[in-house]
Structure formats: structure tokens, C-alpha cells
């Protein structure tokens, strides 16, 4: 039998579905959505996961961890958590410790609190009102914390969520205390433990599926790199021998390395290419660690090193990446759209989150009235400024960094120097 909380959830889902179907633009896109979801690879993956969950559930029943009374909870876990794990295959590949973190998350305090709160439900009317309130507060909390200007709203939402959670915990405690004698304690323990062993039990399935997906992608890239059948076989054998079960490292193998791998004349040479890649990858990891250590060590430090580079380089990398992307967009616009730089390009780009800057990125831009010169700049958290600009037909890229931003266009303001393409010390 459905609880009032579950019934309220179904009502809200039905209302949301009705609203979606009432929008013509959304209705028109549903066939494309269904065709994407009903692709054989997705259908087979979901069916395989359902079969696997059924199998470990039968095993759990044999050892006394599952019974038919938990069927509803098992189905709910499959829809809410199981499918989420399935569709997080890319995340499982990209994050090196995804599986260990996911397993540990099943025994975090909040996981037990969620199960604990579900021991008691309210009337249907209260549940219908409470669920959208909790959803809105959670949304406000996530969105508001992204912007420093609205973090106070996020803090208020967090405070209200904590108060509601505390109130529900107290009410559950009172209810459990009043009905302790009649409480089915063994079934309660099974209910608490089910999401833990289900999640941990499904992780091997997700791991194997993720590994197969990564090998398929790698093998396809080998096929694109060469038409030679024996070269393909050598490269694929080397990949199997070298990476075997290392999802994260296999996923990261890309780029020109596939061409080198496909060019190997023997399996030994192919493995040597992979060994060189592993060495290069370790160097990159060490370089990132060293960069992070320097950022930590010199946070707040004033002055420059013996090469004239600023000691505190927080946001330097992200700022240069954002300005370089802005310059690329301006150059493309000039060449393809009429021989002038665009005034409202910052509004079109929107944000530089992919370059690592916050939503309020702080990038400023000026375009000369004739559209033949422009520059953009940003002040980092350290106070140091970076700028980039062009004058005339690209490529004519000028770069600048200093304690204050430029006040004029390249070639006009002397702070840019006397020629374009001359890198500044912190660029």
C-alpha cells in the first residue's frame, strides 16, 4: 500500500506530466526524446540492470536480507537511485574514486536520516503542501549559493530546510517512542539496510558496464586511426593488456596517442606507446599537483619572483583562458561576419564557467566606435589585471598584465607596449 508521502509524490508527478503535455513546444519534442530513450543500447542497459537487481535481490532473500514486503521500496530504489547510477557512467569514468565515494555515501549520516524520516508520514494534504515547499527551498539553496550576491538567500533556505528536517526528526522520534512495543523491529532494520546493500551490490555491474563502454569507445577510435586490420588488432590487444580494469585511465587516453598507437608495428611497440602515454600522464598529474601547491603556498603573498612573475597567481590561469576564448570569438566574428568586432559579444557568450570563472565573472570589454579595435580585461582575486585585445584585421592579438587595467585600445594606450604578439611575463 502506498503511503501518503508516496501518493503525494505521484500526484505531483502526474500534475507535472499534465503541464508538460499541455505545452505544444514540449509535446512536439517528445517523439525525439522517446526515440533517444528507446535506443537499443539504453533499453538493453536498463533491462540488464533490472535483471541484475532481481538477481541480487534473490540472493538477499536467501540470506534473510529481503522479503516481499520490501518490493515497493526495491522498485522505488531502482527508479530513483539505480537508474541515476546507470546514467552516471560518464561520471564514473571521469572521477577516479567514483565507486569508493558512492559506496561510502550509502553509510553517511544523511542517508540514515532520509530513511529515518520516512518512518512517519503526514496527512495527504500536509504532504501535498510540504513537498513543493521542500523542493523550492532546495532549489533556492543550490542556485543562490552560486552567486555571492544571493548567498544570503541560500543561507535562509538552508536554515529553513534544517528547521523542517529537525521538526520531522522530532516527530518521528515521538511516534517511534509511542509505538515502540508494536514496531516491527526486524523489518525496520531490513528497510534501513536495503538501500545500502542494493547500492553497493549494483556498483560491480556499473563498473563492468562502464569498462565495456570505455573499451568500445577506445576501439572505435583505433578503427578511425587506421584501416589496417592487423594494426587494429595489435592496438586493441595492447589496450586490453595495459589498461585492463582501469576505467579512469582508459577514458583519459585520447588525442594524437591513438594515431601513434595505430602506427605501431608490433604489440610490443604498441605497449611502448602506452607506456610513454602513462609516463606523460604522470608528468601532467605531477605538474597539476605542483601548480596547486604553489597556489596554496603563495596565497596572499606580495611581489614577484626572479623572473618577474607574480607570486600569488590565484585565478591567473582561469582569467587567461576566459580572455583567450573571448579573443577567439571576436576574431571569428571579424573574419566571418563583416569585418568588425562585436560590441555585445560578452552578452552572447554569457559566462566563462567552462574556463573556471564564477557566474559573476567580472570580465569587461570595450569596442572602438568604428569596430576595428577592441580589448577585454579582468581583475583577479589578487588584484592583478589581465587584458587582451586586437586592432585591425586579425591576427593582431595584444596581451597585457599589470596592477591596473588598460585605459585605451592596443596601439593607442602605451601600457600595451610597442608591438602585438609580445607576451607579458604573467601570460
Image: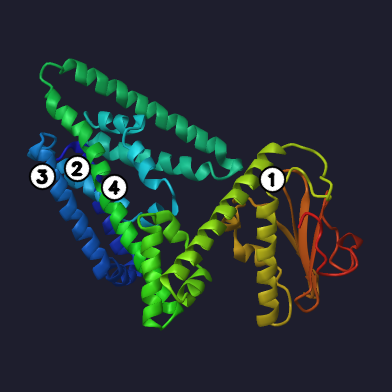
Name the residue beneath numbered marker 3.
Answer: 58
The residue where tag 2 is placed is 7
| Vertical order, 281 against 219 (above or below) | above
Q: Which label lies toward us, 3 or 2?
A: 3
- Mark 4 closeness class: few <14, some 14–19, many ≥20 residues within 10 Å: many
Classify residue 11 as left or right of residue 307.
left
The answer to which quarter of the image holds residue 280 is bottom right
**Quadrant for the C terminus in the image:** bottom right
Q: Which residue is mark 1?
A: 314
Q: Residue drawn at (34%, 68%), measured in percent from left and top?
A: 216
Q: Identify residue for label 4.
A: 203
Image coordinates for residue 57, horizontal then vertical, percent: 14, 44
- Residue sitting nearer the eye, 207 or 414: 207
Tell me whether circle 1 and circle 4 mark residues in contact (CB < 8 Å): no
Camera-side residue of 271 and 21: 271
Which structural element holds mark 3? helix
Q: CA distance from mark 1 to mark 2?
A: 50 Å
Name the one closer to the observer, 222 or 301.
222
Q: Is residue 244 visible?
A: yes
Amino acid at each position: 500500500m502506498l503511503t501518503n508521502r508516496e501518493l503525494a509524490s505521484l500526484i505531483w508527478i502526474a500534475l507535472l506530466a499534465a503541464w508538460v503535455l499541455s505545452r505544444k513546444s514540449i509535446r512536439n519534442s517528445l517523439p525525439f526524446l522517446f526515440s533517444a530513450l528507446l535506443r537499443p543500447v539504453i533499453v538493453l542497459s536498463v533491462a540488464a540492470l533490472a535483471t541484475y537487481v532481481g538477481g541480487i535481490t534473490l540472493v538477499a532473500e536467501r540470506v534473510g536480507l529481503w522479503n516481499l514486503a520490501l518490493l515497493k521500496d526495491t522498485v522505488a530504489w531502482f527508479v530513483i537511485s539505480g537508474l541515476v547510477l546507470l546514467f552516471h557512467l560518464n561520471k564514473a569514468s571521469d572521477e577516479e574514486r567514483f565507486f569508493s565515494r558512492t559506496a561510502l555515501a550509502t553509510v553517511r549520516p544523511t542517508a540514515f536520516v532520509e530513511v529515518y524520516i520516512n518512518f512517519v508520514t503526514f496527512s495527504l494534504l500536509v504532504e501535498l503542501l510540504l513537498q513543493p515547499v521542500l523542493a523550492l527551498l532546495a532549489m533556492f539553496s543550490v542556485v543562490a549559493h552560486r552567486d555571492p550576491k544571493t548567498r544570503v538567500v541560500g543561507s535562509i533556505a538552508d536554515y529553513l530546510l534544517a528547521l523542517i528536517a529537525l521538526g520531522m526528526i522530532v516527530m518521528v522520534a515521538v511516534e517511534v517512542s509511542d509505538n515502540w512495543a508494536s514496531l516491527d523491529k526486524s523489518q525496520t532494520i531490513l528497510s534501513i539496510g536495503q538501500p545500502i546493500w542494493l547500492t553497493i551490490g549494483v556498483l560491480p555491474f556499473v563498473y563492468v558496464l562502464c569498462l565495456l563502454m570505455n573499451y568500445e569507445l577506445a576501439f572505435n577510435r583505433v578503427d578511425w586511426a587506421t584501416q589496417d586490420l592487423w594494426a587494429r588488432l595489435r592496438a586493441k590487444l595492447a589496450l586490453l593488456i595495459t589498461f585492463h580494469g582501469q576505467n579512469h585511465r582508459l577514458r583519459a587516453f585520447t588525442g594524437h596517442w591513438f594515431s601513434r598507437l595505430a602506427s605501431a608495428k608490433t604489440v610490443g611497440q604498441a605497449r611502448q606507446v602506452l607506456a610513454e602515454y602513462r609516463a606523460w600522464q604522470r608528468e601532467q598529474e605531477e605538474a597539476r599537483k605542483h601548480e596547486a601547491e604553489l597556489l596554496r603556498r603563495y596565497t596572499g603573498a606580495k611581489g614577484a619572483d626572479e623572473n618577474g612573475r607574480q607570486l600569488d597567481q590565484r585565478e591567473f590561469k582561469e582569467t587567461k583562458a576566459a580572455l583567450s576564448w573571448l579573443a577567439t570569438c571576436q576574431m571569428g566574428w571579424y573574419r566571418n561576419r563583416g569585418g568588425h568586432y562585436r560590441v555585445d559579444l560578452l552578452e552572447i557568450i554569457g559566462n566563462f564557467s567552462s574556463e573556471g570563472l564564477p557566474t559573476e565573472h567580472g570580465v569587461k570589454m570595450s569596442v572602438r566606435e568604428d569596430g576595428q579595435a577592441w580589448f577585454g580585461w579582468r581583475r583577479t582575486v589578487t588584484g592583478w589585471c589581465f587584458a587582451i585585445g586586437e586592432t585591425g584585421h586579425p591576427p593582431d592579438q595584444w596581451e597585457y598584465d599589470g596592477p591596473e587595467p588598460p585605459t585605451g585600445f592596443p596601439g593607442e594606450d602605451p601600457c600595451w607596449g610597442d608591438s602585438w604578439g609580445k607576451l607579458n611575463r604573467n601570460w
